[in-house]
Amino acid sequence: MASRPIFLALAQPDHLVSEILFSFPWSPGFSASQKKKNVIALHDAARSNGLFPVLEVSTKSEDLLGQRLSAFNLKIKTAQGEMTIESAFQGSKVFSGGGPYTDIYSFDSRSAKKDERLKNSGQLIGFNFFGQRWPLEPKTAFYDWLYLTALRPHKEFLRRLYIYQGFSDIEFNPERSINCQARTCALLVSLLKMDALDDALTSQQRFISVIRNDSYKQPHSNRPMQQLLIDD
């Protein structure tokens, strides 16, 4: 058995995202077929508890929209060109012994995540994205900002996400990581329903004030895990 969270968009200013943990039979293995079995098992567990439909937000999703919303595929536009959210996130990490390693911006997502410098540069101390510095607290702020900034131009199209009661990411293990694309997708839906996305993205300070409570509130991130962010 395994346990994984599903994230719900609450659209409440003081609580934007809720997290529910479900247990289900785990199919071991690294093949795509095994991971899809786990997605189905997780969604079946949610359905048996009245939560349906659920969108898997990852490259393992059966839904094309879920695949496109994966941080491995989703791209953010910058003055220096496009890059995936994953490459932007990894390339912006600042460690006690080095970084940011901005050449990672040009890498594909898998290569970006596996770059050895991210494991050998000491403790993670923050982020620097083209000169804009982001702290480790609130825990999910920088990742959320990257993801939502990339999706902002498509906000009208993304209102179709309203049909989903929850969002999952089978690759996300709350014992090892903090940032999760499915959680941020639920955050997006909450802000869209509140017509608050544009306001939240007006400045870094405003964004942090909007998401601060939820960035701290997630059950899986209530304990110190900065060092584990290296694996995100």
Image: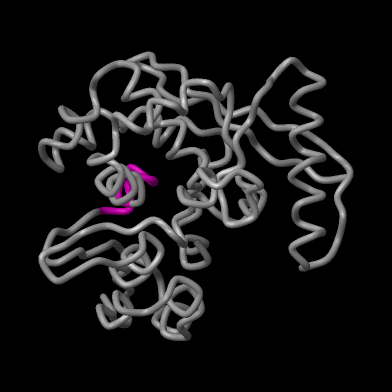
Residue 1, above or below 118: above
Residue at 47% over, 85% down:
116
Q: Residue at x 60, y 43 (%)?
A: 63
Q: How is the image coloured?
A: one colour
Q: Residue 74: x and y, percent?
A: 39, 56
Q: Nearer the viewer, residue 37 or 170?
A: 37
Quick one: quadrant of the N terminus? Answer: top right
Tell which of 135 and 32 is nearer to you: 32
Tell me if 93 is positioned left or right of 45 in this view.
left
Number of marks:
0
What residue range appears in magenta? 135-142
Q: Position of residue 111 (x, y in %)?
A: 47, 80
Horizontal side of 61 relative to 23 (left or right) equals left
**Quadrant of res 132:** bottom left
- Figure quadrant of residue 191: top left
Is residue 198 positioned above or below 136 on the image?
above
Residue 24 screen position, x and y as percent: 84, 38
Residue lying at 36% horizontally and 27% vertically, measured from the top left: 213
Q: Nearer the viewer, residue 223 or 140?
A: 140
What is the chief secondary structure element of the magenta stretch?
A: loop
* Residue 232 image position (x, y, % from top left): 50, 61
Residue occupying the point 33% across, 59% down = 75
The part of the image, by quadrant, that contains residue 140 is: top left
Report if residue 214 lies within the magenta region.
no
**Apparent side of residue 163 relative to residue 136 in the rendered image (left or right):** right
